[in-house]
Amino acid sequence: MFKKVLAAILAVSMILLAFGCGQKQDGETTEPARKSAAADGQKIAIIIGEQAQNPELFAAVSEIARMYDNSIMIVKYAANYYADPEAVTNIAQTIAGDENVQAIIFADGVYGTGAAVQKVHAMRSDLRIAVCNPHEGSVNMKGADFVLSVDFPALGEAMVRQAKDMGAENFVLYTTNRHLKYSSVVALRKAAEDACKAQKMTFKLASSIDRLADGRDLDTAKMYIAEDAARKNDKFGEKTALVSTDAQVQGAVAKEALRYGMFMPGTFLPSPLSIAADLGVDLTGHETESKYALTQLQADSDRTPGHIATWGFSVPIAFVQTALDWAINVVGGAGKATSVDDVQKLLSAHAADQAVTVTTDANGAYLVQSEALVL
């Protein structure tokens, strides 16, 4: 146990160094003026995965690190977190051991976050905890004070309705056995399947490569989508909608849908940034700018001729920015209780001028909805 804690402490130190330093082009270290998120030595910690797990989220948190002083801690868990259920917990407990840390934000509530939240809460009931996008569902986030999630039942229904409006007669949902254990995916699948019955559309559940469980890389997962999209086109024809529960292959799904004249009526983790690069948009220098991605996608009418839809802002980025605003307010003495209207206002500031609707579920988590934009 000591070795695990020591390794976690060393990892925290190395990661803080990696995120905390800025450089001029000539190689000289520079320290730009930074904001403080808390007073009197207090800190807010943000826990995030590797860059490959969610590039746009990683880029956004990197910007936060450059914007704030050492009142913000950025800590990464290992890429193999799925193989080690205690990976997220070990990092979170190490952070909670620092009495100056007043709030922890799990930027992406991956597998293991629920256990981490409960153990950290047991360690320090005074610590405020936020979770963005809880993969295991809000019911498993007991101990968290602030939980943000997409309203997945509403999203599933909306994507089917959008597919029907686009002209689709078939709806294909790519997923994995691991994803089907997550309540978010279960909820979206059921809503989509029920909506297909109501719309008299064919619903098809399709297997996809599980990069974590199978140990495969992203290129392989995208190649599988390309190969299977051809098979789906042969079987169902072009009046088919394709959707994936893997946020990192959403761009590949969009690309293949366009190749065969099919449709992608929405994205599981909504974001125009997640599909832009695969559709030929150069995001260099604009990795966190949803408006830029949308403008570029819409600039060429032949690029996505009414066949692709997604929300007009990045959910991963908007969620972590909203959670940070909440944490700053809490640490500053505003209290942990937040009304639906308050959350909607906080979130709207990061939604790239897109309208959002916030409700709550039975566990007190905030559920977010928005309208998809057809590109």
Image (spheres, rainbow, N blue to C red):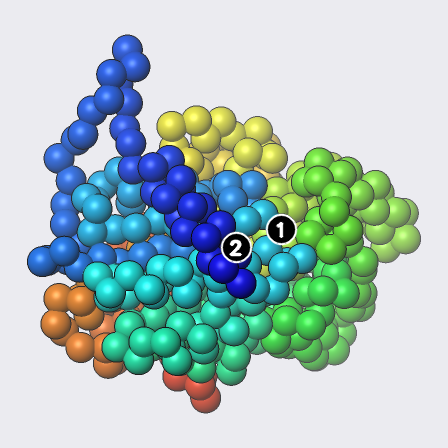
Looking at the picture, tell me which residue is in the foreground, 152 or 41: 41
Q: Quadrant of residue 92?
A: bottom left
Secondary element at image label 1: loop
Locate residue 270, reporting x and y percent. 50, 55
- Kindly identify the amino acid type of the residue bearing the numbered disc 1: Asn
Q: Which of the two discs, 1 and 2, sits closer to the camera?
A: 2
Q: Is residue 181 left or right of residue 295?
A: right
Identify the residue under disc 2.
Answer: 3
Q: Earlier in the sequence, mark 1 or mark 2?
A: 2
Q: Is residue 264 left or right of residue 109?
A: right
Tell me how far mark 1 sits from mark 2, CA to CA.
Answer: 18 Å
From this viewpoint, is residue 287 visible? yes
Q: Is residue 187 left or right of residue 106?
A: right
Count the numbered circles shown.
Answer: 2
Label 1–label 2 contact, CB within 8 A: no
Locate residue 178, reporting x and y percent. 72, 64
Question: What residue is shown at x 18% (from left), y 29% (from top)?
Answer: 31
Question: What residue is shown at x 71% (from left), y 49% (from top)?
Answer: 211
- Kindly identify the amino acid type of the residue bearing the numbered disc 2: Lys
Q: Residue furthest left?
A: 40
Identify the mark at residue 80; answer none if there is no mark.
1
Q: Quadrant of residue 245?
A: bottom right
Looking at the picture, tell me which residue is in the foreground, 175 or 1: 1
Locate residue 109, reporting x and y percent. 49, 64
Q: Residue furthest top?
A: 26
Disc 2 crowd rating (10 Å Cα; few below 14, some 14-19, many 20+) is few
Question: What residue is shown at x 30% (from left), y 50% (from top)?
Answer: 73
Identify the mark at residue 224; answer none if there is no mark.
none
